Amino acid sequence: DAGVIQSPRHEVTEMGQEVTLRCKPISGHDYLFWYRQTMMRGLELLIYFNNNVPIDDSGMPEDRFSAKMPNASFSTLKIQPSEPRDSAVYFCASSLERTSYNEQFFGPGTRLTVL
Amino acid sequence: QKEVEQNSGPLSVPEGAIASLNCTYSDRVSQSFFWYRQYSGKSPELIMSIYSNGDKEDGRFTAQLNKASQYVSLLIRDSQPSDSATYLCAVNLYSGGGADGLTFGKGTHLIIQP
């Protein structure tokens, strides 16, 4: 079975540009999570969805960040405008609630560099 | 505020020995606990999950949970060079009413010396 799919795998952009990261969760999973990983702060939760509905976005750092999940198989994380401090690896993860206690499976990540 | 603490290491263990990784957490109501392995430049990979006090074994891996002490550990028996990675401890508040995002420790860098 296919795991979580993310695109692009690498993104290099200039400060002020809009960045859109994409995620396809594991088929049938009803939870989708966006995380960000940096050396300084480690792995942090940004936002998560249940059945396409945002549940908790308290981890989104600023209004420049937004996330959507228009259907069960697709989610986007958008940064507009981007800043150098947004440089990080962004991971998407998914889980199936009715299985044991929300085991989350991660995608390969998108490495974002903002110049 | 949920916090998860791990020794950053590096923890150096000779090949064939037992590697012991530790994690403490601050939120007493945390319900489920996970260990992820992350190789450099790769994504976290789930290797163990544990929900009840005591030990849970899976192959060379054993997870141990003590909720009273707010402590979870991971033992790796017969350590192999391929076990060299960063191990992330994660906790999840799950009361049966819905899932939650994971809170991660900063990770322990494990080095298995051939």
Image (cartoon, coloured by chain):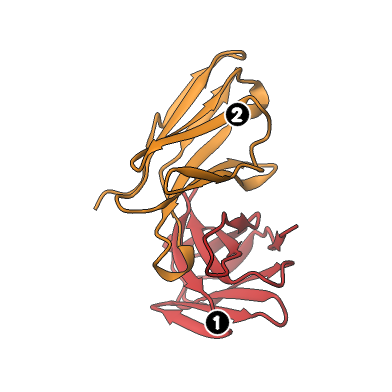
Chain colours: A orange, B red
Q: Residue B60, relative to residue B103: is it above or below?
A: below
Q: Amino acid at mark 2?
A: Phe
Horizontal side of A71 relative to B53 (left or right) equals: left
Check contact, mark 1 vs mark 2: CB within 8 A: no
Asked whether residue B114 appears in the rendered view, the answer is no
Q: Which mark is residue B102?
A: none
Q: Amino acid at mark 1?
A: Ser
| Image spot of residue A66 (x, y percent) | 56, 30
| Image spot of residue B6 (x, y percent) | 68, 63
Q: Find numbered disc 2 in the image and state the secondary structure of the residue it sits on.
A: strand
The residue singled out by tag 1 in the image is B52
To the question of a shared chain for discs 1 and 2, the answer is no
Q: CA distance from mark 1 to mark 2?
A: 37 Å
| Image spot of residue B13 (x, y percent) | 57, 69
Q: Find numbered disc 1 in the image and state the secondary structure of the residue it sits on.
A: loop
Q: Residues within 10 Å of mark 1 (few under 14, many from 20)?
A: some
Report the residue at 45% width, 39% height from top: A109
| Image spot of residue A105 (x, y percent) | 42, 54
The residue singled out by tag 2 in the image is A65
Asked whether residue B93 appears in the rendered view, the answer is yes
Q: Quadrant of residue B64?
A: bottom right
Horizontal side of B49 relative to B53 (left or right) equals: left
Q: Chain of mark 1?
A: B
Report the residue at 67% width, 27% height from top: A85
Report the residue at 58% width, 19% height from top: A80
Q: Residues within 10 Å of mark 2 (few under 14, many from 20)?
A: some
Horizontal side of A39 relative to B100 (left or right) equals: right
- Figure disc tally: 2
Q: Chain of mark 2?
A: A
Q: Residue A48, relative to residue B55: is it above or below?
A: above
Q: Quadrant of residue B31?
A: bottom right
Quadrant of the image containing the C terminus of chain A: top right
